[in-house]
């Protein structure tokens, strides 16, 4: 045996049996228990740390998530998932604890020292192929997770930089529907919401109140056909559709949606009095680029009996569906629309109000 081969054999024997050095003379079962104990301890400590990190991560994540997401209250650390993960961790601990005994559990140390005579360095590399493959798989998975985490963080930062077009500080929203069997007349419906708004505004700590058919990032705005007076539709052409939202007095101010031109809704705007409508900046740029849309007329495209509404204001665009897409062109109508002889009022409305302090303190007041 020449020096190079002997050197490789000694080095390989040291690498293979270094973990068993403290167990020289011990029985195979004693060595196996040592390997198993170490593997189970490492798996247990890693599992406990994983549970702690997951618990805190879920709580921190929920603090930044809107509370009106469906089933958001069910999000948490599930015990069934933890049990399944514990079984997987136990299986991995047993496998990797028992694996060294299968590979290097031979009592014939002299035979392992002489292994280099017949196989040399090439044989050693072949025996280590599985271990090298595991290392490669671990590195590949780590790079995939690292890349995915980086992309998720970048997307999160990009979403935080998006201007939603409305304010969320000290705002509280709720949904209220009037049973059709209790109030059927449009006047009574409109009067109910008007009185509710005045009573809420009179509460100490509530600065402003508004009502709308839908609020941003809620159930989504309606998508109806419209007609623009100075852009008549050709016979046989498809109808024009746009996002529509029926809102009451004070809604735009309460949501913090900026007024860019004209005015917002006032008392008297509606089917029974002033036929007024407000459009977003993107809607105005689409139909009247470079000019003011104030004073132009439009109506809902349900039929020729619909009344024409005068555009009295232009407001900033707001994200109603999500923050990723460009805000849709939107038209804000008063809470009562339709023919003047038979106006229609919205019976299901979203309430939003701005408070001077924590808005959750006013939940009970709103219920009463």
Image: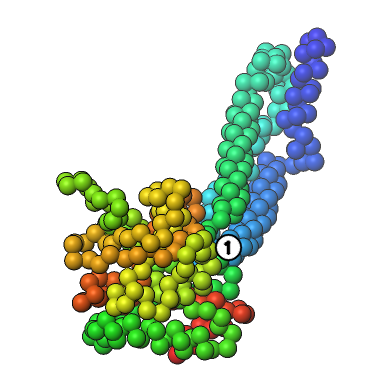
Who's the residue at 79% across and 22% down the image?
Answer: 10
Q: Is residue 169 visible?
A: yes
Q: Report the label total.
A: 1
Picture quarter containing residue 267?
bottom left
Where does residue 58 sit, x and y in percent of width and height? 58, 61
Q: Nearer the viewer, residue 99 or 278?
A: 278
Residue 260, image x and y in percent? 51, 61
Quarter the C terminus occupies: bottom left
Determine the residue positioned at 83% across, 12% down: 3
User: Left or right: where does residue 224 sit relative to residue 328?
Assistant: left
Q: How is the image coloured?
A: rainbow
Q: Nearer the viewer, residue 267 or 346?
A: 267
Query: Could you tell me which residue is drawn at 51 percent across and 64 percent down?
Result: 259
Is 45 situated left or right of 368 in this image?
A: right
Farthest residue, direction top:
2
Residue 286 higher or lower than 310, as above or below: above
For disc 1, the marked residue is 64
Name which residue lies at 58% across and 48% down: 158
Nearest to the observer: residue 320 or residue 87: 320
Q: Position of 30 compared to 303: left or right? A: right
Instruction: Determine crowd level at label 1: few under 14, some 14-19, many 20+ residues with C-alpha closer than 10 A.
Output: few
Farthest right residue in view: 3
| Quarter in which the N terminus is drawn | top right
- Do we see residue 322 in this rendering? no
Q: Secondary structure at mark 1?
A: loop
Q: Residue furthest left?
A: 236
Quick check: 305 above or below 98?
below
Expressed as whole percent of the image width and height from the top left, the position of residue 291 reads 44, 51
Across and down, in percent, residue 275 comes to 32, 70
Q: On screen, 319 above or below 134?
A: below
């Amino acid at each position: 045996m020449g020096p190079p081969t002997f050197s490789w054999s000694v080095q390989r024997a040291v690498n293979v049996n270094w973990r068993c050095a403290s167990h020289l003379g011990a029985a195979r079962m004693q060595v196996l228990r040592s390997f198993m104990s170490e593997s189970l301890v490492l798996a247990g400590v890693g599992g406990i740390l994983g549970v702690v990190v997951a618990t805190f991560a879920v709580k921190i994540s929920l603090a930044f998530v809107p509370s009106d997401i469906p089933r958001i209250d069910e999000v948490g650390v599930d015990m069934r998932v933890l049990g399944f993960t514990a079984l997987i961790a136990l299986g991995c601990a047993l496998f990797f604890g028992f694996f060294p005994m299968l590979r290097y559990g031979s009592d014939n140390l002299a035979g392992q020292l002489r292994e280099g005579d017949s196989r040399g360095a090439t044989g050693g590399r072949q025996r280590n192929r599985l271990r090298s493959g595991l290392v490669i798989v671990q590195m590949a998975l780590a790079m995939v997770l690292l890349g995915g985490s980086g992309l998720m963080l970048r997307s999160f930062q990009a979403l935080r930089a998006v201007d939603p077009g409305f304010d969320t500080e000290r705002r509280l929203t709720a949904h209220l529907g009037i049973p059709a069997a209790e109030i059927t007349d449009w006047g009574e419906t409109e009067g109910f919401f008007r009185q509710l708004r005045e009573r809420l505004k009179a509460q100490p700590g509530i600065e402003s109140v508004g009502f709308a058919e839908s609020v941003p990032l809620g159930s989504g705005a309606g998508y109806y056909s419209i007609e623009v007076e100075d852009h008549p539709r050709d016979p046989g052409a498809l109808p024009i559709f746009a996002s529509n939202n029926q809102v009451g007095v004070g809604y735009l101010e309460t949501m913090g949606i900026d007024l860019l031109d004209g005015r917002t809704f006032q008392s008297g705007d509606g089917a029974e009095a002033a036929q007024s409508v407000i459009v977003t900046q993107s809607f105005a740029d689409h139909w009247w680029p470079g000019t003011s849309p104030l004073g132009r007329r439009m109506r809902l495209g349900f039929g020729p009996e619909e009344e024409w509404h005068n555009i009295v204001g232009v407001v900033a665009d707001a994200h109603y569906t999500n923050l990723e897409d460009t805000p849709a062109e939107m038209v804000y109508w008063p809470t009562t629309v339709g023919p003047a002889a038979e106006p229609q009022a919205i019976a299901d409305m979203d309430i939003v109000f701005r408070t001077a302090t924590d808005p959750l303190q006013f939940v009970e007041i709103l219920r009463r």
